[in-house]
Image: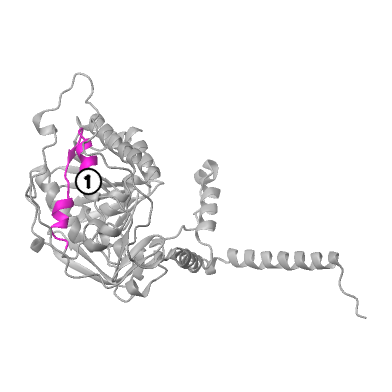
Amino acid sequence: MKKLPSATTHRIIKLAVSFVSVIIISTICFIIPLRPTVSETEKRELAKFPEFSFQALMSGDYFSDISTWFSDTMPFRDSLMNLNSKMQNFLGTSGVLAGFNEGAQGDVIPDSPTPGETLPEGETATESETNEPETFAPEEITYPADKGEAQHVEQLSSIVICDNAGFEYYNFVQSTADNYVKALNTAGTKFSSQANVFATVVPTSTDITLNEKVRAKLSVSDQKQAIDYMLGSATAVKTFNCFNNIKQHRDEYVYFRTDHHWTALAAYYAYETFCQAKGITPLPLSAYEVWSFEGFLGTFYNDSGKDPALGNTPDRVDAYKPPCQYSMTITDKYGNTTSMPMLYDETNAPASYKYGTFICGDNPLSTITNESLTDGEACLVVKESFGNAFVPFLVYHYKTVYVIDYRHYTSSLSSFLSTHTVNDILFVNNVSMTRNSSLVSDLASFIAG
């Protein structure tokens, strides 16, 4: 009779196999040519292996950046992320909507704004420093009606797909919204003597273009009510509420179907409301040269596990080039400055990258100079990625447009203003950001620092 291996032998074999597997996987992970340089799923370039410098070595940044590079460029990263997304959607999918009322319940949105923070003792707001009611749209507003019934509606764990478009859930969070308002009011109180401080909150597609009958079945908060509450509470800044003007154009191409961002056309309608608040005349759309990039498949497409309902109808990214000469530089977290185009040619870019045409994506600091002006005002835009499509419309009106992405900028607003003179400061954030406690905290720290 053949003698079977002992339990000890089994354990040794298992350990040996595990050890060899770890060695093989580790070897693969350290082969630099096998490590990806871009992520189509996340629509960004991945971390690069850092260049050596004694300054980075002494500060500890060199080894920290190696660690970031190693974790960020794991081989087969996108495939693993897409597999995880598909598994989540498989476990969280409930099929066609029929009386669907799932999702987290948002907080009740107050009918009245919260009391705003006061100006420093001894200062009083002049008439030009107070917010006036929005007058861009008429008091009685009629929005374009739905073009027809929804034919296909599918609930996924992170989004809803209606026909060939994705939509995200939005739920109002009172405490986070109030902290966002507090941050805006702090900015107005601290910096209104140096510049005019403006703010808007951008709606997402769910309350603009989603079929109204489908929207009524979702357990989501009313974005117009939430935006009215937050901007109405931001009494220390000048506000421009773009909700009505965008929704009046809801039957136009104002939001992507496969991505969570607005299009540049929607950003133009927000720019119109800003011009009204500032008291300047917006350029007509006909004054811009339009660049178009076909084949865009964005975050909704990836979050859905590349659902064919979205993949079969890719988006088009339109960018509007202002009628002036301009140049742009971007500054990284180390202070290195590079010249880059304000509108980047994304014709041959991966499908998920094409929104990056606007100001070359998210960078700590971007500086755009209107070369057609010998003199003029300067402004600062404080934003997350929604602000990218908005910025190009400002360039015609200012000699210099500074853009800070507070998620990546390592200094403070006070520090920036100590070395840069601006006439206007604009806070441009989307409504979903105002329920994200981490992002609101980052913004508040940037303002208070």
Badge 1, how many Cα within 10 Å: few under 14, some, many 20+?
Answer: few
Residue 179 makes an appearance in the image: yes
- Residue 194 place in picture, x, y as percent: 20, 32
Q: Quadrant of the C terminus?
A: top left
Residue 373 makes an appearance in the image: no
- Which residue is painted at 19% across and 38% down in the image? 232
Give the residue at the far front of this rendering: 99
Q: Is residue 215 above or below residue 137?
A: below
**Nearer to the camera, 217 or 316:** 217
- Residue 306 place in picture, x, y as percent: 39, 71
Image: magenta residue range: 228-250
**Nearer to the camera, 13 or 338:** 13
| Location of residue 343 by image quarter | bottom left
Q: Count the marks.
A: 1
Residue, disc 1: 225
Which colour scheme appears in the figure? one colour
- Which residue is painted at 32% across and 62% down in the image? 99
Please tell me whether residue 248 belongs to the stretch shown in magenta: yes
Please tell me whether residue 83 belongs to the stretch shown in magenta: no
Give the residue at the far bottom of this rendering: 1
